[in-house]
Image (spheres, rainbow, N blue to C red):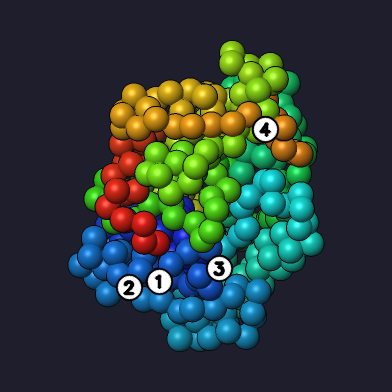
Amino acid sequence: MILVTGGAGYIGSHTALSLLQNDEDVIIVDDFSNSDKRVLENLEKLTHKKIQFSELDCCDEQALEQVFIKHTISACIHFAGYKAVGESSKIPLEYYNNNITSTLIILKLLKKYNAKRFIFSSSATVYGSPETSPINETFPLSVTNPYGRSKLMVEDILRDIIAAEPDWSIGLLRYFNPIGAHESGLIGERPNGIPNNVMPYISMVGAGKLPCLPVFGNDYDTHDGTGVRDYIHVMDLAEGHVAMLAKISKEVGLSTYNLGTGQGYSVLDLVTQFEKVTGQKINYEIMPRRQGDIATCYADPQKALKELGWKTTRNLQTMIEDTWRFEQDSQGKSR
């Protein structure tokens, strides 16, 4: 059985769906700090399966161990981390405590119950402010914010573990910028409160739920001055985890992959494309740069194609169409 921590959240729920559709047995744990219980109902609608679930905080070792006692866990995909770059610079202690402590507890339990297979949600932020793009897995690692530092710290922990205990099977997946939603409109990105990520923010402005999109910085060295990122459809990202699980189920060692499209778009590119696809006008306001943000970041995804047989198949138009469908179908309710 695959343990999916943070499995009611944005990326976790879409990955749980892909796993279930690939006939994997899954148990989700989540504390709903940035997700909603109705996600589980919608996963059941999509899969026609009863979702196995436990509500808990992964920093609570005693509670999490009960999952290992009750179920035969064979691997863990770990999504239960705080994830907002800007917020991490304001509350770094909370980010370090949650993102690192939860991982240490999970690894301790995987070892105790002889289930040494682990996929970690890392991030392109571990590349810091790269001198060039596209970015491949051999680029130097550095960070510009506490969120990225928490990811890099965990990567270092995992590299130390594999050096000491080479019978572990570990996948490090460095995500670029997930957007979009499942094509059904039943699950997507619906954070609690004001969104930290750009696409749900644009979507909520388009729906009239928020008045204006803040654009942080228009003086970067990019084609329009706004930050350029590699936006990847969340279902492509989910399918990358299924491919990674297949690899760690057969091989020991540690493998690292970028999950991205290899294409960069600016914030204003997103705004323009969203207006074109949906017909909704997006009001935006230029704001000062955020601490820790960088100008340009997009992936070289060739290693994942070569070794995992994985590549993205959904373009930016599809990402926006699926985002907007989810926004409309959710009718203002958390999903």
Q: Amino acid at mark 2?
A: Ile
Residue visible at 53% across and 58% down in the picture: 193
Image x and y of residue 66, in percent = 53, 86
Badge 2 crowding class, 10 Å Cα cut-off, few under 14, some 14 to 19, many 20 or more, is: some
Upstream in sequence: badge 2 or badge 1: 1
Q: Are marks 2 and 1 in contact (CB under 8 Å)?
A: no
The mark lying in front, picked from 3 and 4, is 4
Residue matched to label 3: 33
Q: How many marks?
A: 4
Residue 179 numbered mark, or none: none
The residue shown at (69%, 46%) is 86
Q: CA distance from mark 3 to mark 4?
A: 28 Å
Q: Which amino acid does the dot numbered 3 rest on? A: Ser
- Nearest-to-viewer mark from 2 and 1: 1
Instruction: From the top left corner, tell me how far across and down residue 163 is, in percent.
Output: 73, 54
Q: Is residue 310 left or right of residue 160?
A: left
Up the image or down, 105 lies above or below 90; here it is: below
Q: Nearer the viewer, residue 199 or 252?
A: 199
Please, what secondary structure does the residue beneath circle 3 have? Answer: loop
Task: Give the CA distance from mark 2 to mark 1.
Answer: 12 Å
Q: Earlier in the sequence, mark 2 or mark 4?
A: 2
Circle 1/circle 3 CB separation < 8 Å: no
Crowding at mark 4 (Cα within 10 Å: few <14, some 14-19, many 20+): few
- Could you tell me if the residues under marks 2 and 3 are in contact, i.e. CB atoms within 8 Å? no
Residue sitting at 61 percent across and 60 percent down?
A: 81
Residue indicated by mark 2: 51
Q: Which residue is mark 1?
A: 37
Query: Circle 1 — which element?
Result: loop
Q: Amino acid at mark 4?
A: Met
Q: Which residue is mark 4?
A: 287
